Amino acid sequence: MSYGYLDDLSHSDRARYTSKLTALSAGTCPYKIPAGSWIDDPTKWPVIEWPDVAYYLIETPGVFTRESMRNRRSLEAHNQFESGWVKTVRYFKPTDSPHCILKADVIPSQRVNDTPHHPWVGLHEKDRVVTAAHCDCMAPIGKSCSHVAALLFKVEAAVRLGYTSRACTELPCYWNNDFVKKVKPAPVHSIQFYKKSATKTVSQRNRYATPSIATDREKKQLLDSLASCSRQPVGLSLFEEHCQPFCWKATAELERLPRYLTSLYKPGYASMTPTELHCEVEEILTSLTVTDAELRYVDKCTVNQTACLTWFMMRAGRTTASRAHSVLHPRLDHPSASL
């Protein structure tokens, strides 16, 4: 870790970092404390428990919330601790201060062979409270990161397992120094992605249990329950006792207007002889029919007369009552253009 870490910070970051040191009464930056002053002895660690760790991580700005802490095993920080990314935790006690400082190197989870991060935490030894913490990763100085959380998870686990109450010559020192030294690449087929306990549970589970054959009574109960639904599934149409609701019903006849006379026009009529045109008219009159239903629909659609476009379309080419007299009694000196 850089000895001049504090000096390399910006003015605002230096002020926030200095406030952490003031809260600890440390007197100096933990990154400037000589390596020989740090002690590898879990029995000197403060007794902090899970509520103390959770309270600090939740109350400190960062990625940790009440919901995420309820399922701590899914957190990246807890995975870093369980995977052995947290190296040896070392202890330092500042002079005339009620606090102590714990530090450890944490291997980056995405770049396991790169330079580790260097988080530290300051704890009040009597009150067992996390007073301040810091890491040299990219997280803002005022927020907690996964590396600080991983360090706290390791300390909490040591307290829970009783390693902080045993002599340093026993298991605690060995446990504290048990971490991943170097990650070696390996082929995919030789990597174990699941714990043995998980694979054992799956292998013991009867995945291909033979289902029992339903009785006639059970089948009837199932069909009756489906038939009572507000929207019956179409599969019921395959069963004789439930197929009646799916029988075909005649649909209402679609109402339509008779053919507009203007649609009978063809540009080729202009070149026909009178005889040819007369034959064409006779053929059209033979095929042109209007049903009673169409007449009723015309009356329904044209009740508003001039306010309705259909009224004008149906009048085109037809002699209506209002025009019958002018058709039968035209003025020979000034005949109608349409006639």
Image (cartoon, rainbow, N blue to C red):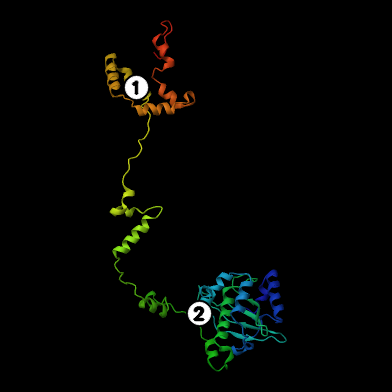
Q: Residue at x 27, y 14 (%)?
A: 275
Query: What amino acid is at disc 2?
Result: Glu
Write down the quadrant of residue 313 in the picture.
Answer: top left
Write down the quadrant of residue 48 in the picture.
Answer: bottom right
Position of residue 38 in the picture relative to residue 303 (left or right): right
Write down the quadrant of residue 98 in the picture.
Answer: bottom right
- The reply to whether residue 55 is visible in this rendering is yes
- Furthest toward the front, the residue is 217
Query: What is the secondary structure assignment of the residue under circle 2?
Result: helix
Neighbour tally class for label 2: few under 14, some 14-19, many 20 plus, Cα within 10 Å: some
The image position of residue 94, as x and y in percent, is 69, 85
The image position of residue 104, as x and y in percent, is 58, 81
Position of residue 28 in the picture relative to residue 301 (left or right): right
Quadrant assignment for the C terminus: top left
- Identify the residue position indicated by label 2 in the image: 82
The image position of residue 207, as x and y in percent, is 34, 72
> 319 or 75, which lies in front?
319
Q: Residue at x 52, y 89 (%)?
A: 174
**249 shown above or below 79:** above
Q: Which mark is residue 267?
A: 1
Query: What amino acid is at disc 1?
Result: Pro
- Furthest toward the top, the residue is 333
Q: Residue at x 69, y 76 (%)?
A: 20
- The reply to whether residue 135 is visible in this rendering is no
Quadrant assignment for the N terminus: bottom right
**154 shown above or below 64:** below
Q: Are marks 2 and 1 in contact (CB under 8 Å)?
A: no
> 234 or 131, which lies in front?
234
